[in-house]
Amino acid sequence: MAIKDDIASEVDGILSQLWTIRGGTVAPETEDVVLAGGAVKLEATMLYADLVDSTSLAIYDRRVAARVFKSFLAACSKIIRDCGGYIRSFDGDRVMGVFIGSWKNTSAVTAALKINYAFLKIIEPKLQSKYAVFRDGTYKLGHCVGVDTSEVLVVRAGIRNNNDLVWVGSAPNVAAKLSGIRAAPYNSWITGGVYDSMNDSAKKHNGTEMWEQRVTVPAIPGGVGYRSSWTWEP
């Protein structure tokens, strides 16, 4: 069978396949979801953390870029886990965290502010100390974290022995787009739905509001979101 016929047959099978959807209370692993029609429905808050302008650094020196990526992803992963989140995807210099449960919005936003601290107070100073290209401004790295919440359908996509989970819903897409915003020092961006549902402990510090409302954020349907330049010590 020619590959084009194989693809056509595969697509026909997918389109006619019946879904077996179950509710979930934890973020599934790949093996928890059946490839043929399996799906898990969750109420989830999604966090994406992304480095800024890392492509030019990777072209300049892959070894330096690799150390930067590993440092950033390690810090993000530790914080996401410490805040109760699940890590379910890495993509180059970006990590996706999933938060479930009653405190999912507060936990995800706290993680975002802690990632901002880790980058600005720990990672960046160490990079500047070790590499002249960061000290002299040749390369200025930054980061951004985006957070959104919605119902998410988790499916397993790909082919046998080569597949992974795909997270389908507005939250994964919007959070990913928010993490692509470049507006330092505002390195944390969340949707109005996240802000409205999170605890005051993640909104204010000693009575001072940590978030600024924005009403024309292109990444957010309807445009209403919030941004912050605050940090939270892990």
Image (spheres, helix red, strand yellow):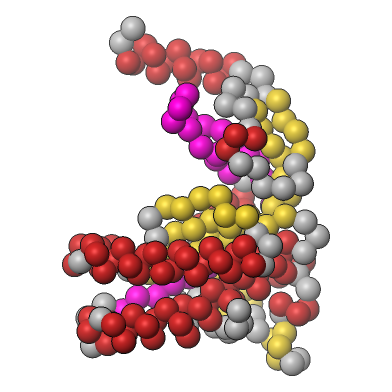
Residue 20 seen from this side? yes
- Magenta-colored stretch includes residue 16: no
Pinpoint residue 54: horizontal percent, then vertical percent. 32, 66
Quarter occupied by residue 82:
bottom right
Q: Nearer the viewer, residue 64 or 48?
A: 64
Q: Up-down: is 211 above or below 179?
A: below
| Image quadrant occupied by the N terminus | top left
Residue drawn at x 45%, y 64% is 73
**Which residue is at 67% across, 47% downward?**
27
Is residue 26 placed above or below 219 in the rendered structure? above
Question: Which percent across, then down, holds residue 61?
Answer: 20, 66
Q: Quadrant of residue 154?
A: top right
Q: Which residues are magenta?
A: 140-167
Estimate the x, y position of residue 191 in percent, counting from the top left. 64, 65
Query: Is residue 191 in sight in this rendering?
Result: no
Chief SS of the magenta region: strand
* Position of the C terminus by quadrant: bottom right
- Residue at the (71%, 40%) spot, across then down: 41
Q: Residue 165 in magenta?
A: yes
The quarter holding residue 102 reads bottom right
